[in-house]
Each structure stands twice: as C-alpha cells, then as structure tokens.
Amino acid sequence: MALKTTHPVLGTRALNRATLARQLLLRPAPMGVTEAVEHLIGLQAQNTKPPYYALAARLDGFRPEQLSALMESRAVARIVTMRSTVHTHTARDAVALRRLVQPGAIDRELAVFVSRKGLDGVDLDRLATTARALVEERPRTPKELREELLPLWPDADPQSLSVAARCLLPLVQVTPRGLWGRGGRVALTTTDRWFDDPAQEAADVDETVLRYLGAFGPASVKDMRTWCGLTRLGEAFERLRPRLLAFRSERGTELFDLPDAPRPDEDTPAPPRFLPEFDNLLLSHADRGRVVPEEARGRTWTGNQAHRVFLLDGFLAGIWHLDEAKDRTTLTVEPFARVTRDRRAALTAEAERTLRLMTPSDIPYDIVFGTPET
C-alpha cells in the first residue's frame, strides 16, 4: 500500500496513549459490562478468570457477578473466534464475528490435523452433521464427543475428531463453565441452540474494520490481520480511506484511525493497571512496541503459558501473581526494573483496588513486591 509522506507522524508514546484510551485503560470507564464487551470486540478467555480481571482493570465499579449474570442469561458467551482462541463475546458477536473470522482459521487448523493423518478417511460433512446432532441433543464435553464419534471412524485420531467438530461447528462453551466462583468442565453446544436469535449474517468486513480501529487504533492493515487472522483486509481499508485519517508510525508504517476517536497528548497520565494473562491489549497488533518496550519482549511467557502483567506509565513493566489460599490472598508484584517510591505507591494503590473488586470482603490480603532481576 503506497505511503504518502505527508501523513503526520505518531510517536510511540502518542500511539500508546491513543490505544490505552480506546482500551478503557487511562481511567476506569463508567460503562456497562455488555457495552464494554461489545466495544472491546470480545475478551480473551483461554482461561476462565481473565475476562473478569480485564473488566476490573477497565470499568468503574465492576463486580465479577455482573459478568457471570450476563453469561447465565446468555447475553454473553465463550466461543472460539479470533486467532482460533476462546473469547467472551456478546451473543451477537459470538455468531456474527465467528462467521466472519473463522473460515480461514478453520481451514488452517484442520489442515494441521489432516497433515498429521489424524482425519484420514473421515467424511467431514458427515462428521459435522453427526456432531451437531449430538451437541444439540444436550451439551457434550470434548471427551464425550470423541467417544461418540470414534466408533464411526475407529482409525481416526480421537482428538482430531473433536477438534474438527469444533472447527466445523459454531460451538459455545455452556455455563457453568466460566462463571465466577463456580466453573465447570467445558461442555459444548451450537450457537443455534444456545441463543434465542442466532439467525445473523456474518459481520460486515468494513464495519469490523471501523470497530477494530475504535478499540485498538490507530492501526495498520497488518495490525488488524494480526488481531483477527483475516486476509485481503487492504481492500477494505482502501474502501474506507475517505472516511479515515491516515498517519505514519516512527518506522514509516501507514496507520489508519477514526476521525473522532480519542488521541490524547503523549504526556497524558497513565495510571498503573493490572491485566490478566492473554489480554488483547498485548496480542492485537503486529508491532507491539506501542505497549511492550524492547527490553520487556519475551519476558511475559514461560513455555506456552502467559503471565499476568502490569503497566507503568502505560507500558508493560512487569508481571504479577495471585496466591488465593483459603484464608488469605497474596498478590505478588514482580517489576522488570527498580521502581521509584512514588510508582511503588501507585502500584500498591492499584493492586488494592483490584483486590477489593475481585476478592471476598472477609478474606484478608497482602501485597508483596519481588526483587527485580536487573
């Protein structure tokens, strides 16, 4: 895509503050939970607790019971969408976004299992029809689904059968899975069976571009591709160009944005924020330098497991752990570098705010600081 040299430059701090504003992380937002989940276009939810901590960091007065109530009423649900990972979405997005973003991901994910010979001889159309009947009869766990499908294809890899079913069908993780303080095994049914009004078209590509910019902009075409996995997005951005503002990053990348979206001054204060593992703030751009400084790259993962992270002055500055014993909760802060007394006090205050929201009032808590490695 040709880059016009007249585009104004947005420096890293300016991009940081703009993104934090869209992500509701500059100040707790006076926004309802459903509205926030829709604005953020879903919450990363490989584990059950991250959506709750993501909202605690962003919303004024959030209580975890609010999200649980929405899940029980089926206003929001857990489903595989962007990047072939589980997200918590509104009912509308669970259907429409999956229909938009999953076809390519389905092909890629199924191709992996096909290449491993796990689905040799399996009629995928028959598998989809059979699996649909099973999960719509009653929600089934992946293990139950494998056990029902394996007699039809005894030479297939059992795990490949259940993964193929998940790829081919829009499968919701039903409650009590994902409820705060309760939980349960993963059990699956279709969006058709779970929602009252599932008959929706796939989300419109152009509308989704605008929503992405509203939640993650300013951003490049490649940034959005990283977020959702869709290809040929450049065509949509070109169609929308007359409605968008164009900038360039310090590296020369063309960035697009909504004209009326907030782009705060780069010196706007950014209070500390404690984020869950896999938070979309860290996963939704090709260039993560707007949030992740070079010295922090690669320090938030152990193997395939992401750590909870915190922000200082808007940038990734360390990880945190939560030990929830029966009679006491301990939040341990591990900065990547030494922090000043003022920043330590600000981190402590934010940790206390998080714990007051997310732990029972009758359970005492401690906040402990680890020693930086550097």
Image (cartoon, rainbow, N blue to C red):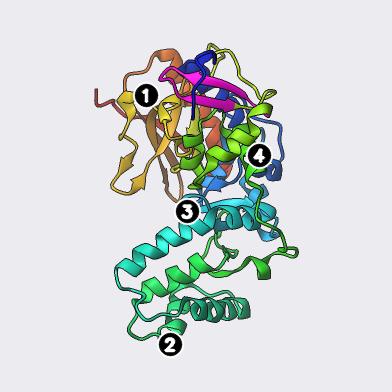
Three-letter amino acid code at disc 3?
A: Thr
Disc 3 and disc 4 in contact, CB within 8 angstroms? no
Residue 146, percent from left and from top:
43, 78
Amino acid type at circle 1 is Pro
Q: CA distance from mark 4 to mark 1?
A: 26 Å
The quarter of the rendered structure image containing the C terminus is top left
Q: Is 243 positioned to the left or the right of 372 in the image?
A: right
Q: Residues within 10 Å of mark 3 (few under 14, many from 20)?
A: few
Sequence-first disc among 3 and 4: 4
Q: Which residue is mark 4?
A: 39
Quick one: 214 or 206, which is closer to the camera? 206
Picture layout, residue 126 above or below residue 237: below
Q: Residue furthest right?
A: 197
Label 4 packing within 10 angstroms: few (<14), some (14-19), many (20+):
some
The image's mark for residue 152 is 2
Label 4 vs 1, first from the N-terminus = 4
Secondary structure under tag 1 reads loop
Q: Label 2 crowding class (10 Å Cα cut-off): few <14, some 14-19, many 20+?
A: few
The stretch in magenta equals: 243-256
Q: Disc 3 versus disc 2: distance between alpha carbons? A: 28 Å
Dot 3 or dot 2, earlier in sequence? 3
Front in this rendered view, residue 173 or 181 = 173
| Residue 29 included in the magenta stretch of the image | no
Q: Say whether marks 4 and 1 touch (CB < 8 Å).
A: no
Q: Which residue is mark 1?
A: 293
Mark 2 or mark 1: which is in front? 2
Give the residue at mark 3: 85
Give the percent coordinates (x, y) of residue 338. Answer: 32, 19
